[in-house]
Image (cartoon, helix red, strand yellow):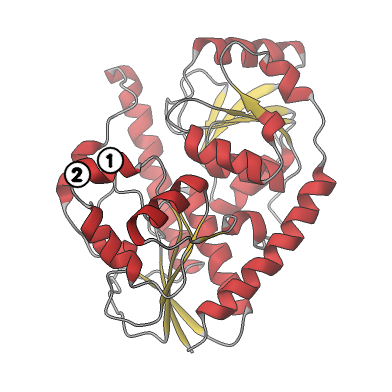
């Protein structure tokens, strides 16, 4: 059986890489199949103007930042080719026995992207066996869809889906409003999928890991509390994968080394979706910084995986949350149950 997986697999992002890798393995575990990644057909580039920059930096910071990004891109191209099987030539085939769209924020046209608003991502494909898995609108709201007059185009694609799965309440609500159908909600592939058992060893002493997009974790109160806690406990502050100008060290790991950094960390401070998942998968003590712009997806995620106690908002004691214990036995029970539910759903998607 030939399967096409339409995902954000070429993005130089660790979460995107691992969700694509985990979903690929879960699909192939459902039976003998040949799986190929489908590339995103570029759409209306005007949607890129809806994205607002969240940081600015001086010329002094710009040089190390751009060198950091260049090196990171080279690393990702290597692993996207070796692990995901992505060649330089783009693949736009749509004649597979089954196509699955997902996971990650494939429905989020408000985010910055090279493809803009592509109706292909919603299911506008010449194939009768198209489904989605754990797809997400991110911070795209129903009002944003109405404001940009895209209800009809998105609904047309979604109505073409044979099976519809999203990963959060906001996405489920949007799908239901546009189609009248209530989609299933599944956990992200990185939660329920397999991560490598053997990882590279990290030997840099004890540290707090910071995982946040470039320059975004800039709240003075957060920085002050993390620095104080690190100094009091003899810990370095290491940012992995993204550039922060207030940490002790910025590191560009490959995707496998990234998991090693999470595994070896004493504590994790993050404000990202997959940073939260990596922390939980490695059974770390962590906090997830919640703000208005990430409340929809991160608040939903923490609730679904039983980690509401890891939420941090301004005015709270970051340290009290960071050092508190986590019941990872319950998390693993949840993973086992959701993994079986995912397998059942994917099997249904792959039936001709």
Q: Is residue 140 visible?
A: yes
Question: Dot 1: within a 10 Å radius of its alpha carbon, few (fewer than 14), some, or many (20 or more) residues?
Answer: some
Image quarter of residue 37: bottom left
Residue 289: give x, y in percent of width and height. Answer: 56, 26
Residue 196: give x, y in percent of width and height. Answer: 68, 60
SS at mark 1 in the image = helix
Residue under the point 51% across and 10% down: 220
Q: In this view, does 39 lie above or below 126?
A: above
Q: Nearer the viewer, residue 158 or 202?
A: 158
Question: Dot 2: within a 10 Å radius of its alpha carbon, few (fewer than 14), some, or many (20 or more) residues?
Answer: few
Residue 148's tag is: 2
Residue 283: give x, y in percent of width and height. Answer: 76, 42
Residue 74's tag is: none
Residue 71: give x, y in percent of width and height. Answer: 40, 44
Residue under the point 62% across and 45% down: 277
Q: In this view, does 5 lie above or below 249?
A: below
**Does 139 sit left or right of 334 as displayed?**
left
Residue situated furthest front in the rendering? 180
Q: Which of 11 and 44 is in front in this view?
A: 44
**Does 97 sit left or right of 253 as displayed?**
left
Q: Which of 76 and 139 is in front in this view?
A: 139
Identify residue for label 1. 144
Distance from the alpha carbon under mark 2 to that under mark 1: 6 Å
SS at mark 2 in the image = loop
Q: In this view, does 303 lie above or below 332?
A: above
Residue under the point 47% across and 72% down: 163
Image quarter of residue 102: bottom left
Q: Can residue 195 be seen in this view?
A: no
Residues at badges 2 and 1 in contact (C-beta under 8 Å)? Answer: yes
**Does 222 sit left or right of 126 as displayed?**
right
Image quarter of residue 138: top left
């Amino acid at each position: 059986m030939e399967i096409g997986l339409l995902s954000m697999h070429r993005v130089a992002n660790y979460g995107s890489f691992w969700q694509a890798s985990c979903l690929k393995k879960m699909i192939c575990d459902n039976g003998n199949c040949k799986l190929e990644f489908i590339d995103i057909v570029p759409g209306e580039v005007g949607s890129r103007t809806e994205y607002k920059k969240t940081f600015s930096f001086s010329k002094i910071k710009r040089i190390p930042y751009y060198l950091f990004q260049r090196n990171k891109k080279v690393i990702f191209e290597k692993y996207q080719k070796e692990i995901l099987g992505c060649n330089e030539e783009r693949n736009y085939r749509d004649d597979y026995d089954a196509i699955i769209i997902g996971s990650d924020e494939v429905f989020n046209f408000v985010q910055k992207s090279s493809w803009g608003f592509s109706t292909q991502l919603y299911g506008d494909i010449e194939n009768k066996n198209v489904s989605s898995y754990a797809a997400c609108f991110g911070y795209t709201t129903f009002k944003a869809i109405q404001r940009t007059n895209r209800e009809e185009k998105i609904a047309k694609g979604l109505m073409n889906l044979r099976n519809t799965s999203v990963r959060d309440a906001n996405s489920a609500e949007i799908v239901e409003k546009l189609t009248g159908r209530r989609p299933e909600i599944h956990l992200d592939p990185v939660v329920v999928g397999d991560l490598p058992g053997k990882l590279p060893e990290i030997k840099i002493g004890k540290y707090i890991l910071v995982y946040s997009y470039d320059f975004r974790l800039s709240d003075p109160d957060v920085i002050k509390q993390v620095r104080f806690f690190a100094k009091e406990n003899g810990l370095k502050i290491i940012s992995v994968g993204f550039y922060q100008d207030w940490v002790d060290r910025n590191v560009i790991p490959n995707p496998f080394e990234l998991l090693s950094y999470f595994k070896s960390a004493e504590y994790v401070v993050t404000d990202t979706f997959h940073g939260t998942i990596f922390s939980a998968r490695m059974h770390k003590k962590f906090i997830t910084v919640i703000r208005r712009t990430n409340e929809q997806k991160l608040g939903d995620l923490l609730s679904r995986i039983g980690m509401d106690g890891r939420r941090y908002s301004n005015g709270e004691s970051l340290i009290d949350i960071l050092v508190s214990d986590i019941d990872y036995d319950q998390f693993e029970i949840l993973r086992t149950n959701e993994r079986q539910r995912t397998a059942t759903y994917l099997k249904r998607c792959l039936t001709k």
